[in-house]
Every structure is written in C-alpha cells, then in structure tokens.
Image: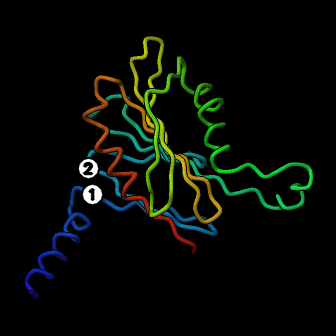
C-alpha cells in the first residue's frame, strides 16, 4: 500500500520536476499567479500583456491579460445594475475579439474550470482567409478578470491545442 502511495506521489510530482517545463510566477501588489511554461516557449511582458510565444512554431502564441474588478461599483448600482460575468464574456465575444481579429467567426464555445474556477471559452477562426485559429478563455477570481487568448495558423492548431490547454490547466492564482 505504501508503495502505491509513493508511486502516485512520484507520478504527480514528476511533471513539476521535469527540466522541459518551468513554472513562471507573476507577482502583483495584491495577487500572484503562475503557469507552466513548456520547453521551446518564451515569455514577453510589455507591462500590460504577458505574451507566451513558441520559438519553433511560427505565429503560435498565448496572450494573458488580467484586470482588477472596478472599485466603488456599489456607488453606481443605483444608476444601473452591475454587469454579470456572463455579460462581460458576451461583450468580449461580440465586440472586443472581432475588433482585434479580422474576419472573426465563432466555431464553438463552452465552459470549463481554470484553477478550480468556472470559466468560459470560445474557439474561433480569423484572418483574411480564415486561415488562423484562436481560442479565448475568460474567468474571474480574486476580484480579477483573467483573459487568455491563444492564436496559431489553422494548419497548426491540432498540434498546438494540447500545449495551449496544458498552459491554461497549469494556471494558479492566489492572494499575496
């Protein structure tokens, strides 16, 4: 019995110890979050977005943005109701993503969990000839809205999708 427990523990810790992966930690005054960066990928931080780019797959990247929830919204609730997460997500799909990605067309969408928190996602095609594929995740945790957008040439999506999913699945956020 003890051998089974040790084996399960070793198997669960092994991915964290693998030299091919590195946990990237981002600190903010109120929160910190982290994700596993796969081998062959690099991070660029422009102060607003964290762009995770593949070194060996042209135009494959994930962009991570997080925004703090508005402070003092209670003062304005008498004017109108506070937008729900679902309304914020739909606004992203209907207005923000089509503005950022030309010829934006939804292929499929659904729900998932990121860091044990309910999240929404949408897979979409874009580009002049719909020759690129993107996937957008959005969820709220710790008074932050996290937006994660992966994009890649459509011909490479099947190859890159498991990597995108592994990065998203490794995401962890906590209060500082």
Dots 2, 1 in contact, CB < 8 A:
yes
Residue 39 image label: 2
Residue drawn 40% across the image and 23% down it: 132
Secondary element at tag 2: loop
Residue drawn 33% across the image and 39% down it: 54
Front-lying residue, 176 or 2? 2
Residue 133 image label: none
Q: Quadrant of residue 95?
A: top right
Local crowd at mark 1 within 10 Å, few (<14), some, or many (≥20)?
A: some
Whether residue 66 sits left or right of residue 126 in the image: it is right
Q: Quadrant of residue 156?
A: top left
Coloured how? rainbow
Front-lying residue, 49 or 137? 137
Q: Is residue 9 above or below residue 99?
A: below
Residue 92 in the image: x percent, y percent?
A: 62, 37
Sequence-first tag of 2 and 1: 1
Read off the residue under disc 1.
21
Q: CA distance from mark 2 to mark 1?
A: 6 Å
Residue 20 in the image: x percent, y percent?
A: 22, 55
Residue drawn 22% across the image and 70% down it: 12
Q: Residue furthest right?
A: 79
Q: Quadrant of residue 57?
A: top left
Quarter of the figure with the C terminus: bottom right
Q: Residue furthest bottom?
A: 2
Whether residue 172 sits left or right of residue 60 in the image: it is right
Quarter of the figure with the N terminus: bottom left
Secondary element at tag 1: strand
Residue 173 in the image: x percent, y percent?
A: 50, 65
Residue drawn 59% across the image and 57% down it: 140
**How many circles with numbers are drawn on the protein?**
2
């Amino acid at each position: 019995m003890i051998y089974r427990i040790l084996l399960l523990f070793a198997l669960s810790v092994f991915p964290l110890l693998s030299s091919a992966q590195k946990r990237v930690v981002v600190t903010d005054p109120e929160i910190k979050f982290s994700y596993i960066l796969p081998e062959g990928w690099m991070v660029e931080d422009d102060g607003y977005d964290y762009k995770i780019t593949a070194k060996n797959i042209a135009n494959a990247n994930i962009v991570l943005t997080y925004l703090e929830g508005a402070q003092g919204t209670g003062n304005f609730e008498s004017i109108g109701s506070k937008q729900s997460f679902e309304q914020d997500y739909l606004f992203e799909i209907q207005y923000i993503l089509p503005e950022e990605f030309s010829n934006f067309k939804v292929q499929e969408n659904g729900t998932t969990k990121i860091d044990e928190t309910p999240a929404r996602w949408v897979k979409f095609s874009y580009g002049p000839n719909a020759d690129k594929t993107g996937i957008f995740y959005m969820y709220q945790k710790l008074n932050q809205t996290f937006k994660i957008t992966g994009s890649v040439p459509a011909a490479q999506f099947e190859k890159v999708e498991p990597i995108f999913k592994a990065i998203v699945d490794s995401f962890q956020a906590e209060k500082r």
